[in-house]
C-alpha cells in the first residue's frame, strides 16, 4: 500500500528560539486522506456519517463507531483529521438527539450553530456539546483501538495516561456520573413499580394468553378481552369480580394509550421526513404516502373507548 508523509503543524516548544510552527511528519495512506476529505466535503450531517436520512438510532451509533475509528487523530495522521473527527462527533450528537435531529431536518445546519455556554469561545463552534474525546470514550472506554483481531472480532486498545483532574473537574465528573446513572435509576424504579403492580394484578389476570392464564373472559363494560387461571369464576364474584375488571380496564387503557402515542410518533417522523429540505422530491412523496396510509390501530381503539365512556 502506498504511503505518504503527512505534515501536521505543531507549536514550537516553550523557550525555543524558533517562534515558527514546526512540522511533524508521519506516514499516512491514501485511504486515510480520503476518509478525511469525504467527511470535510460532506454537505449534510447524514453524509458525514454515511447514513440515510431515515437511519435509526442503532444505525447512527454503528456509523459513528466505524467513522470515528478511521479519523481519530491518534490513528489517522492525515492533515485535518482532527477537524474531520470533530465534525463526526458533532454529527453524531445532533442526529442521536431526537429534538435536535428534528430541528436539523426542518431548518438545516444553521439551527445547530451552538451557543457558547458550556465552554469558552476559544474552544470552537461545538463548545456546548461533549468534546469529541468524551464521545469517543463513551464508546471505546478511553482507549484508542490499535489493532483489530479478525478471529475474535474485537479491538485491542492502548490506553493513554491522563493528567490528574482538578477539583473542579472532579466535581463536574461526579455530577456527570450522577446524571449518567439517572436513567438507570428511573428504569429500576419503573421495574420495581411493575413488579408491585404485577403482584396486585397479574396474579388475577393477564391481557395476553400465556402460562396459566389460558381462560379468556371479557369485561362487562367495553368487552375488553383478558385471560384468567382456572378456578377464577369460583374465587371472584360480585364486588370482587367488579374490582378485578376495573383493574383490567385500567391496564388496557394504559396499554392502548402508550401504543397510540408510539403510532403518532411514527407518523410524525414520516411527515417530518417528507417536509425535510434534505429529502429528495421522490422520497418526500414516498414518506408522505406512508404517513397518509399508516393505520393508527391503537388510536382508533382509544377513540372507541372514549365513545363508550371508558375514557373521558
Image: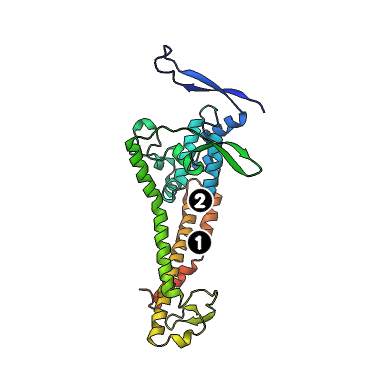
Q: Nearer the viewer, mark 1 or mark 2?
A: 2
176 and 41: which is toward the camera: 176
Residue at the spot x=56%, y=36% of the render?
70
Q: Quadrant of residue 66?
A: top right
Given the current orientation, which residue lies at the most extreme top position? 17
Secondary structure category for the residue under label 2: helix
Callout 2: 10 Å neighbours few (<14), some, many (20+)?
A: some
Callout 1: 10 Å neighbours few (<14), some, many (20+)?
A: few
Tell me if residue 54 can be seen: no
User: Residue 105: percent from the left, percent from the top?
Assistant: 46, 47
Label of residue 292 in the image: 1
46 and 14: which is toward the camera: 14
Q: Quadrant of the C terminus?
A: bottom left
- Inter-mark Cα distance, 1 to 2: 24 Å
Residue at the spot x=43%, y=80% of the render?
222
State the colouring used for the structure image: rainbow
Tell me if residue 15 can be seen: yes
User: Residue 135: percent from the left, percent from the top?
Assistant: 46, 41
Judging by the rendered image, the residue that carries numbered circle 2 is 57
User: Residue 296: percent from the left, percent from the top?
Assistant: 48, 66
Residue at the spot x=50%, y=61% of the render?
292
Amino acid at each position: 500500500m502506498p504511503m505518504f508523509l503527512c505534515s501536521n503543524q505543531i507549536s514550537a516548544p516553550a523557550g525555543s528560539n524558533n517562534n515558527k510552527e514546526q512540522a511533524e511528519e508521519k506516514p499516512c495512506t491514501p485511504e486515510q486522506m480520503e476518509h478525511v476529505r469525504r467527511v470535510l466535503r460532506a454537505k449534510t450531517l447524514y453524509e458525514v456519517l454515511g447514513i440515510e436520512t431515515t437511519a435509526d438510532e442503532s444505525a447512527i451509533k454503528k456509523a459513528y463507531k466505524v467513522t470515528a475509528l478511521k479519523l481519530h487523530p491518534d490513528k489517522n495522521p492525515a492533515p485535518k483529521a482532527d477537524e474531520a473527527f470533530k465534525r463526526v462527533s458533532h454529527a453524531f450528537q445532533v442526529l442521536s438527539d431526537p429534538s435536535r435531529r428534528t430541528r436539523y431536518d426542518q431548518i438545516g445546519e444553521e439551527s445547530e450553530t451552538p451557543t457558547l455556554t458550556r465552554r469558552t469561545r476559544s474552544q470552537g463552534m461545538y463548545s456546548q456539546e461533549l468534546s469529541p474525546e468524551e464521545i469517543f470514550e463513551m464508546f471505546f472506554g478511553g482507549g484508542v483501538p490499535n489493532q483489530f483481531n479478525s478471529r475474535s472480532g474485537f479491538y485491542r486498545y492502548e490506553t493513554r495516561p491522563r493528567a490528574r483532574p482538578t477539583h473542579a473537574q472532579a466535581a463536574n465528573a461526579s455530577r456527570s456520573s450522577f446524571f449518567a446513572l439517572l436513567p438507570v435509576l428511573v428504569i429500576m424504579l419503573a421495574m420495581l413499580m411493575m413488579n408491585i403492580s404485577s403482584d396486585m394484578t397479574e396474579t388475577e389476570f393477564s391481557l395476553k394468553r400465556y402460562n396459566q392464564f389460558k381462560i379468556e373472559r371479557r369485561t362487562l363494560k367495553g368487552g375488553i378481552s383478558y385471560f384468567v387461571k382456572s378456578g377464577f369464576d369460583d374465587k371472584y364474584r360480585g364486588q370482587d369480580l367488579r374490582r378485578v375488571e376495573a383493574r383490567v380496564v385500567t391496564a388496557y387503557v394504559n396499554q392502548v394509550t402508550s401504543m397510540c402515542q408510539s403510532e403518532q410518533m411514527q407518523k410524525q417522523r414520516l411527515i417530518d421526513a417528507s417536509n425535510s429540505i434534505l429529502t429528495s422530491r421522490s422520497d418526500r412523496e414516498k414518506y408522505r404516502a406512508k404517513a397518509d396510509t399508516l393505520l393508527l390501530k391503537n388510536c382508533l381503539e382509544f377513540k372507541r373507548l372514549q365513545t363508550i365512556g371508558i375514557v373521558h
